[in-house]
Image (tube, rainbow, N blue to C red):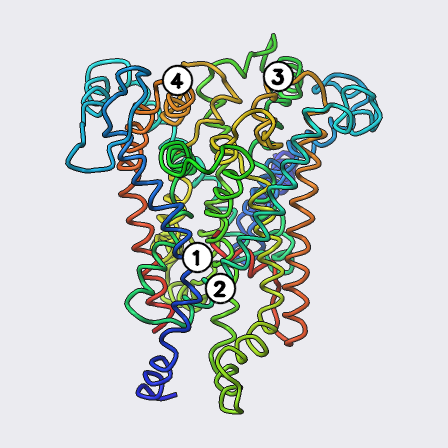
Amino acid sequence: MSAAGTELGEKRRPAARLKAWWSNPWGKPRFLILFTWAYILWSLVPVAIAVQFGFNAGRSRSTWQGFSLRWYFQDPNLSVLHDPSLRAALVQSLQLAALTMLVATPLGVALAIGLARWSGWGSRSANFLMLFPLITPEIVMGVALFLVFVHLFGFVQLGTMAQVLGHVTFTVSYVVIVMRGRLFSVGREYEEAAMDLGASRWQAIRTVLLPMLYPAIWASLMVAFAISIDDFVISAFLMGDQSSATIPVKLYSAARLAPSPAINALASILLFASMFAIAFAILVMGRSRKKEGKGGSAVEDFARLDL
Amino acid sequence: MSAPDERRAVGERRWLWPSLAAPGVIWLVLLFLVPLYAVLAVAMGAPDPIFGDALPAWNPLAWDPSEFGTIFGEIFTGQLDIVFLRTLVYVAVATFLSLLIGYPVAYYVARHAGRYRVLLLMLIIAPFWINYLMRMLAWVNLLSTDGYVNQVLMFVGILDAPREWLVGKHETVILGLVYGYVPFLILPLFAALDRIDQRVIEAARDLGASSAQAFWRVTLPLSSQGILAGCVIVMLPMFGDYYTATLLSGSPKTNMVGKLIEQSINTGGGSGRGAALTVVLMSFVAILMTYYLYSVARASREART
């Protein structure tokens, strides 16, 4: 009887301990820890597997047959480097992203400075106008730009020109958002001090404000590049023919037919390009934080951007 | 700086700030507002008698709403009702699931992550900068007939034979939508939860609330703004999504409204119908957009005071 009792007690004890360990209110929130890491694995592992298959030695995109670079450049006909349509998509994507970055950043930086300092009646409506492209479903913008280029701005040919105009239109708002945080934290005092010391307004902006904005401007360039290179809908609606297809457009048309892992390789190149841009943006912002002796991390700033 | 001072300083520089903003504003007017008007003009245009394609009616007095008549007729009597209903159901289910997944993650990272916070945030931001189509492509690989998902499910014994995930399955499309848009919901939630003052929750606990009660009656209500903002942020692009269903199912059985728009625009003579569908979609999401702009305006007012 007593032997049976202790046996039962010993059996119960680990279970009870487990229960106490699990529900200890002062302990770590174990369920949340597990859940969060499970989410992160779920969100990133499929992409990692897709990248891996870009390095597959065989033709399959679902069975691993060993490592090779044949789909990047070794295969003489089917690799990204040698297949003319894949290479054209890569070139088109890079070209579009570079042009968009160069046009959208100055436009957005000026708009951000204007909106941050201007407090007239027009400022509020301009601010709303700037927010609109961020929340309009992309398909609406794609259709709208397509129709306007076909019916009204006939001088803009569908293709690279139309795509750049379209990309800049939705990228400008992101640049403004990136710049805005920095502008609020810099405040007007520095320009005013410069002007008290005899600088003209324009000099104050050029020699005082702009240098303080450089880290944010670099970040804007990189964000504009990444946003543009990742875009699918606008590029697809505004391409005239296959010659202006970008990487995402190629992914869309080839993913289901998918002749080979070259499409995974192409997607991976896109991934590396935008990851590189964003890592660079975070590094630049992080360095300027450190220089100014601020705590926290640039990653948190990025998370708070509300893109 | 005192108020009159500030007003004078602003007055002195009146021309400078608007002229800095001007190029951007003009750009957005010409390439955002005018195009939106063009959609309306094409939707309201009369069909070209020769080619059948819509001719835009730029003058509101010449508007011909017959295209809308056709569409609403189809919504209420046949063909189209199912597509609109399907879009609504997909978006509703996917948003709900995203919230269910996103809230615990945002909660943990904002309030309990400690020294892993920056690392976790970095991993959560990463999907933003991975191309959406690549993320869908990843699932096309995984869900293909001989893909890892089928292999694992057959190994565990849940499936006897490989399942055709990629042909007209509702659950696959919803999985794709959730997978695609969850990160966009987590960040506003994270921001809202991160703002909650720890002392408020401690006060609730001190006053005798259990941790569950403190969560349901303090933390959750305080994060409701973030929940709404996050849901709107994911619903807006989901309503216009057409590529997820195309990639993950490729069957007319899972088409969403966006797909109809894309097809109409890309077929000769269909741009009038495509434009009208776009206007319908836009008025559909206008409520959501208004709410979002309103909440942004309120947040910036609160930030200023």
Q: Is residue B32 left or right of residue B191?
A: left
Identify the residue shown where x is 68% and y is 67%.
Answer: A287
Question: Numbered disc 4: what chain?
Answer: B
Q: Quadrant of residue B200?
A: bottom left
Spatial CA span between label 2 and label 1: 7 Å
Between residue B154 and residue B250, name the one nearer to us.
Answer: B250
Quarter of the picture containing the N terminus of chain B is bottom left
SS class, disc 3: loop
Quadrant position of the C terminus of chain B in the picture: bottom left
- Residue type marked 3: Ser
Q: What residue would you read off at disc 1? A: B24
Check if mark 3 and mark 4 are on a common chain.
yes
What is the crowding at mark 4: few (fewer than 14 residues within 10 Å), some, or many (at least 20)? few
The Cα–Cα distance between marks 4 and 1, rounded to whole angstroms, is: 34 Å
On whether disc 2 and disc 1 are found on a single subunit, the reply is no
Q: Is residue A223 visible?
A: yes
**In the structure shown, which secondary structural element does the residue marked by tag 2 occupy?**
helix
Q: Amino acid at mark 2?
A: Ala
Q: Which residue is mark 4?
A: B268
Residue at the spot of label 2: A110
Are the residues under badges 4 and 1 in a single subunit? yes
Q: CA distance from mark 2 to mark 4?
A: 41 Å
Same chain under badges 3 and 2? The reply is no
**Is there CB contact under 8 Å for labels 2 and 1?**
yes
For badge 4, the amino acid type reads Gly
Q: Is residue B226 above or below residue B52?
A: below
Residue that carries the numbered disc 3 in the rendered image = B144
Circle 3 or circle 4, nearest the eye = 4
